Each structure stands twice: as structure tokens, then as C-alpha cells.
Amino acid sequence: MFQRLFAHRRVVIQDPSLAKAFFSDTQFAWLWLLFRGYIGYDWLSHGLEKLYDPKWMVTGESLKAFWDRAAVVPATGKPVVTYGWYRDFLIYLNDGSTHVWFAKLVVFGEVAVGVALMLGLFVGITA
């Protein structure tokens, strides 16, 4: 009886036709190209904005201000950051003055992601 209940049968579940059309058919590649281009442009433009801002590239003030706002517990008692461990992590980063070099990391990361999306890098790996 045990073997009959737990017999291994191979069941193949087909993808929905709409999902198959969007993700498996090259007919919609142009749609993904437009989507990737738009998202890549958004990442790149925000990264370049920060690249020429001294508050990001020289002092890191912008990132420090963001971390300060995220870590504070307001009078209502509900902090912006949901998880306590992440709040503690932000406070640790802020106390260590890591905002100066971490801001540069954020900027170069945004520019790199934008360029990679627009050029289609890693698309074959993630597909």
C-alpha cells in the first residue's frame, strides 16, 4: 500500500500559453528590448546624476542623510526600516563613517547595472 501511495510518477505541467509566448517565443524579443532599454536608461541616468554630485562622490552626505532618516524611530513608534537587524546594520555603517566610500560604490553600481541592462549583458545567463 505504501508503494502504491508514494509511487513516483513523472508529471509534466505545461506553461500557460501567455507565459510561453512572452518568455519562450522570440516574437516578443522587441518588447523585452524596449523594457530593458527603459529600465537601463533609468538606472544609468540616476547613476550619472549622482556621479556629478559632490554630495555623493566627495563627501557621501546624501547617503549619510538617507541612512539617518532610515534608522531613526519616529514618535509614532514605527520605524522606516522594518527589521531591527537591518536598522542596527545601518547604524553600524553610519557610526563607522563608511558613507564616504559606500556612496561611491552605490553610484558605480547604478551606472554598471544601467550599462549592463542597455547592452544586454548577462541576458543569456539569466534567461
Image (cartoon, rainbow, N blue to C red):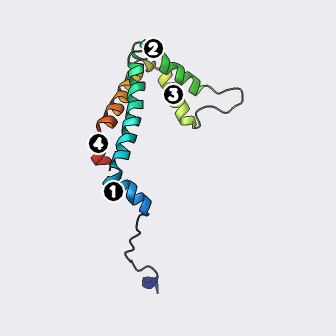
- Mark closest to the chain's N terminus, 2 or 1: 1
- Label 3 and label 2: CA atoms lie apart by 19 Å
In three-dimensional space, the C-alpha distance between marks 2 and 1, rounded to whole angstroms, equals 45 Å
Q: Nearer the viewer, residue 47 or 25?
A: 25
For label 4, the residue is: 122
Disc 4 residue type (three-letter): Phe
- In terms of sequence position, does the residue under pointer 3 or pointer 1 come before the other? 1
Whole-percent x, y for residue 53 in the image: 42, 15
Give me the residue at 64% from left, 27% from top.
73
Q: Which residue is mark 2?
A: 55
Instruction: Name the front one of labels 2 and 1.
Output: 1
For the image, the number of numbered tags is 4
Residue tagged by mark 1?
25
Relative image position of residue 46 (x, y in whole percent): 43, 25
In contact (CB < 8 Å): disc 2 and disc 4: no
Q: Is residue 106 above or below residue 33?
A: above
**Image mark for residue 90:** 3
Decide: few, some or many residues near mark 2? Use Cα within 10 Å; few <14, some 14-19, many ≥20: some
Query: Which numbered disc covers residue 86?
Result: none
